Amino acid sequence: MKGDVPLKLRANIENTESFSLLIITECNRYDAGKYTMTLENAAGKKSGFVNVKVLDSPGPPSNLKARDVTKDSITLQWDMPLIDGGSRITNYIVEKRESTRKAYSTITTNCQKCSLRIPNLAEGCEYYFRVLAENEFGIGEPVETAEPIRATEAPSPPESLNIMDITKTTVSLAWPKSEHDGGSKITGYVIEAQKRGSTQWTHIATVKALDYLVKNLNENEEYVFQVMAVNSAGRSDPRESRPVVVKEQLTLPEFDLRGLYHKSVIAKAGDNIKVEIPVLGRPKPTVTWRKEKHLLKETQRVNVERTANATILNINECIRSDSGKYDITAKNIVGEISDIISVQSVVAAYPFKVPGPPGTPQVIAVTKDSMTISWNEPVSDGGSPILGYHIERKERSSIMWQTISKALVVGNIYKSSGLTDGIAYEFRIVAENMPRIMVDAKFKDVVILKAGDTFRLDADVSGRPPPTLTWTKEGKDLEVTGKLEIKLADFSTALINKDSLRKDGGAYTLMASNPGGFAKHIFNVKVLDRPGPCEGPLSVADVTSEKCVISWLPPLDDGGAKIDHYIVEKRETSRLAWTSVATDVQVTKFKVTKLLKGNEYIFRVMAVNKYGVGEILESEPTLAVNPYVPPDPPKTPEVTTATKDTMIVCWGHPESDGGSPITNYIVERRDRSGLRWVKCNKRILTDLRYKVSGLTEGHEYEYRVMAENAAGISKPSSCSPFYKACDTAFKPGPPGNPRVLDTTKSSITIAWNKPVYDGGSEITGYLVDISLPEEDEWKVVTPPAGLKATSYTITGLKENQEYKIQIYAQNAEGVGDPALVPGTPKAEERIACCTLRVFVPIKGRPAPEVKWSRENGENIERANIESTSSYTLLIIENVNRFDSGKYMLTIENSSGSKTAFVNVRVLDTPGAPQDLKIKEITKESVTLTWDPPLIDGGSKIKNYIVEKRESTRKAYATVAANCHKTSWKVDPLQEGCNYYFRVLAENEYGIGLPVETPESVKVSERPLPPGKINLDDVTRNSVSLSWEKPEHDGGSRILGYIVEMQTKGSEKWTTCTTVKTTDAKISGLIQGEEYTFRVSAQNEKGISDPRQLGVPVVAKDLVIAPAFKLLFNTFSVLAGEDLKVDVPFVAQPPTGPVKIEEVTADSISFSWEPPKYDGGSSINNYIVEKRDTSTTVWQIVSATVARTTIKASRLKT
């Protein structure tokens, strides 16, 4: 069986009486695991197992999931593969692909953890990810995210939350749209409220609009409201409102008259007047209207309409008498206000009516073929003067009237001729003024209807003679069609349009004309329909191989409703099907992504209102290609620094970046002995240099570099020359701080410091050149092999001659750059080498005895003294700084004595600083202190020079050349190394004598406390402890450990023992007493802080219960045979495991650890036994083993 599953098809099993053979051919990683073999017969059952490890590439990682998602990054997390292929996982490879693509791209090939943050994702895009594990045998199987993951995050909160209105139970809220939707469409807004004094937020509602009325609030309660935007990634941070107290707002009434210009309304006679005035105030005011100080009498034509927030005065078909001053008054419990509105009804074009009938015509003269008639003028002219009359007649026996006046008759007398003798006639007269069109009041506003409906425009006309009627639209006469019908009568007309479309909307003009003039009326019709096409062109800009930006203008015809959003679609020119790009675009610009490189696309946009999707606006075909190209190759690379396993490669920018910034450089190398180019950098590289590591010493390599931009990777650069991987040595740098120490009339003594840069090779010596100031020819004055020291005296010079001096350092590579000694030193005696002459005249009788001495009574050994009866002369040749001081002159004779003194000041370099001490030592620094020199050389000390040298070297290196204090911290130093230090003072005459530390100083400090302390054993009178070494020894070897103990109730710590190992046994304890222990580490710098055992210990013997372990639980024996049952039992066994040290054909060497508890008595010996795995019988190998190791020999092969 494998695990708990029986082996089936893959395994071939061969069984005999003496063995069982399991064969699995062409095994793979899934064949690894634990194989269990079970043997069973009548005597019992036995199982054994074999662990099989198959060396293969690893299986897929498990439990891949997205742990953190933002708008531009996703963090993945996974577990290690269940099957590692028999080798440690070295790294993971993470790849991604957009959900619209099929190919994966690599994110990283060297992920060392089981998580990775993937940045720079396109906001709102969906991605698949997969992870592959890699071991030494190759890359394993991938694990892929089951569903695409959208790069999105919670939206930003609304910019503000505004309180719009407050009543005693409601609060009206409003807020702007979130500035950023987090990469996913905002699905709604969550509103919550919090009462004052409460920490609990209560959910109020979730809405899609940008305002909300919160109802059923407690009056006089203070609330704070908050709103959060919601998308598919979650909620935004909340945006809180200001605190608000819910109560009825008491305000004085107020009229909002901003909509009335100068508080006046001017209308044409016959028009409808609608005056809407918003009324403010809490509680709601009562509004009354008056005209000319009389309460307005409401009729069907003149009435007042009252809404929640306004009062509306309606005057239908206004006339002149409606003009005047209208008083409006608003009143509530807070107060009362009034205002005046002026209404003016003016006479518009053709305001008159049809004139009244003329008087009954009278016959005033008759002949056999004519009649003369007369009549009176009409009582009413209809508001317009009578232009003339039309005369009509008929025979008495006829019913047909015919007009007999060919033209308009002016005056009120007319002669009708052409009559038939004996026939009776009747006459009638019609007065004429200008024509007039009359329409229903509903046609004076815009006629609004939905698409597909039928609209009818009706009009009555008046005028004499009956006017001619014509319908026009946009200046063109309308013709009757299948859907448009025009009905005409003498004094009425109607236009009927069926199945109305958006284009049927507009202005319809009715013109009525007769000889007296004309009149017209415009009918405005609005058909509510889907929007028209967006105004073009549909422009495509910022085109790349993956995206572009399209823009357009809103449609000229919005279909009678606000444009809600736009729909954007695309199609490839090689296909007929359109695919959706976006279905909820709020602006007239959109960024289209996920285009395929090289494909040609056409885009189209449709506006959407509440009536549907509008007409289409298409773009011209656009090719999805980058406006840029891959960059030119970089400049030829070169190696600036090389070691045995690394090289630093440098190169120059490409001539052209291809129109897109360089985002990465790819460095490749090739071994001279190989053919394959190997990529050197795995991460993004934007610098123009790269350190290549992992090279093989002695091999030669050439390099090439490729540049990468948004369009792709450039061609490789030209190959560099071959460079050999070896430690490179260069000539050394110039020596440091060259200076003159002393001069004589024939020599100059100079000194210098070791170069800062030795060129990677040890300095082998120094060379000194001299030259006359006016010459360029240099002469070497040092031995050809060079000097080992850092000072030199140039001899054989000409007195008072100036010289130029330069110093070179040399190593295995040759002579380095020179360091020039400042100025042109002169070969002359220094000031301090002069002769001191002190001439003192004396007198006295008898001649006095002369005695010269130093201030402290010392004799003057170096002085030549010449004394006579009249003077004394003190001469000291070649004075130096030590000859400075007070010189005492004493003259004495039998009459007495006299003492005088002379102060001598020798101008020289200073003496050595005093009392150089080590103030502080750490593991990486040493702090020095000193006192100024006793002798300053007659000049103020300018600064000090601090130098160091390792105890294994002879040359000093300058640490500080301009120290102005009498202390200095020397760092950084090599931990654990020994150093000498010296300090020199400097004045205007040069650098003085040094003072040096007498002994070397080791750079170290006290160690850290020991590590964790373990309690290994406890008896009635002893305790065994062990501990870990300190994490840091302070830079100096641990000399030992100090173990201390403290009894319960005592504050004193007592040293138990001092040991050099990391364990100790403390004996002599009192049984039953409680102790606390601590351990400190010690090195040559001191004792560390102590580490204390975590719990107190009581001194008492441990009691361990016995235990036994049966080899078998069931025994089978034939009747009559002996039954032998071996029961191994233990109390405190030796400490395992048993370690196999060595195995040969007939022996095994192994070892073990002593028991943790010896039972209160020392271990005498160990008993070692062996057992063949085919039996259950143990045999003694040795019963007298004194050590914890043994070699068992004479074993069967």
Image (cartoon, rainbow, N blue to C red):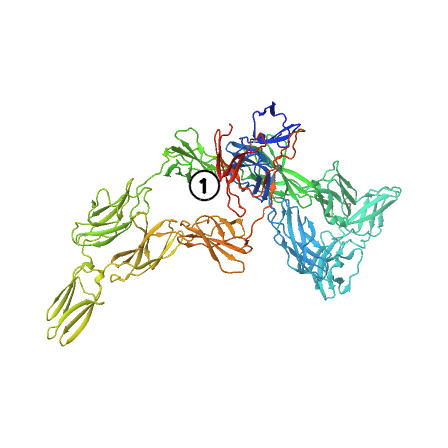
Which residue is labeled 1 in the image?
686
Q: x%, y% of residue 734?
A: 29, 46
In the picture, measured across the screen, residue 807 lies left or right of residue 500, that is left
Left/right placement of residue 315 relative to residue 731 reads right
Q: Residue 1149 location in percent, x, y? A: 48, 34
Front position in the image: 548 or 464: 548
Q: Amino acid at mark 1?
A: Thr
Residue 629 seen in the current view: no
- Please give left or right for residue 349 compared with residue 822 in the image: right
Q: Secondary structure at mark 1?
A: loop
Quadrant for residue 10, please give it. Answer: top right
Estimate how packed mark 1 is, as few (under 14), some (14 to 19) or many (20 or more) residues with alpha carbons within 10 Å: some
Q: Quadrant of residue 495?
A: top right
- Residue drawn 78% across the image and 57% down it: 303
Vertical comparison of 304 with 401: above or below: below
Q: Is residue 940 visible?
A: yes
Of 172 and 1081, the residue lying toward us: 1081
Please state the horizontal and vertical placement of residue 556, each as a whole percent of the image: 64, 43
Which quarter shows the N terminus? top right
Q: Position of residue 1053 (x, y in %)?
A: 48, 58
Query: Depth check: 856 or 883 in front?
Result: 856
Pick the residue in front: 861 or 353: 861
